[in-house]
Amino acid sequence: MSDLLVGGVFVPGFDNPLEILLACHGKIQTQCATLRMLLQHLSSYGCDSQARQAAQAILRYFDTAGQNHHDDEEQDLFPRLLATPNAEVHELIARLLDEHKVLDAAWQQLRPLLLAIAEGRATELDVKSVEHFITVHDRHISLENTQLLPQAAILLDHMQLEALGRSMAARRGVVFSNRC
């Protein structure tokens, strides 16, 4: 079995990199839900300690794990898929890379606003920036979950998936373990 039971939840191992990417999408959606709740919280309670902590957690996630996730795709997964002769997947990756630019721009717009909340310098977030950030992530994640990851599971062999998992583990400073 490649998954570990951590805190009552099964967490995929790096020997199952496509499941890790899928799990990352779930974590991104959780952070987006926290962001939406933060928006509501700020309107009711202002920039209290809970608001600052939520903003700090969102910043920490997207500055580290979120960036690692994009790197996993852009530096490791996409090149492996582009090496296949599947034109449909090549077009999908071109679209996803364009969307990554949109996601990055949305983060660059939202990040300073969250930083101001985290530091207690602001009491509100721009609703349009928050909604844009969430919307572009939802659309992107849906496309990757329904099209990219299923295609990757078909097109990549065991050796390619293992190399992908090893690279993802190394990016995070984790020792790769092939747990069977």
Image: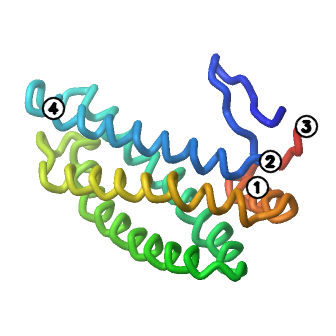
Q: Nearer the viewer, mark 4 or mark 3?
A: 3
Q: What label sits on residue 15 in the rendered view? A: 2
Amino acid found under the numbered disc labelled 1:
Gly
Q: Nearer the viewer, mark 3 or mark 1?
A: 3
The residue under label 3 is: 180
Cβ–Cβ under 8 Å for marks 3 and 2: yes
The residue under label 4 is: 40
Q: Nearer the viewer, mark 1 or mark 4?
A: 1
The residue under label 1 is: 165
108 sits to left or right of 177: left
Amino acid found under the numbered disc labelled 3:
Cys
Q: Secondary structure at mark 2?
A: loop
How far, Cα to Cα, is label 3 from label 2?
9 Å
Q: Nearer the viewer, residue 124 or 17?
A: 17
User: Residue, x 68% and y 69% (percent of image)?
Assistant: 76
Give the position of the C terminus as an image quadrant. Answer: top right
User: Residue, x 47% and y 74% (percent of image)?
Assistant: 97
Cβ–Cβ under 8 Å for marks 2 and 1: yes
How far, Cα to Cα, is label 4 from label 3?
45 Å
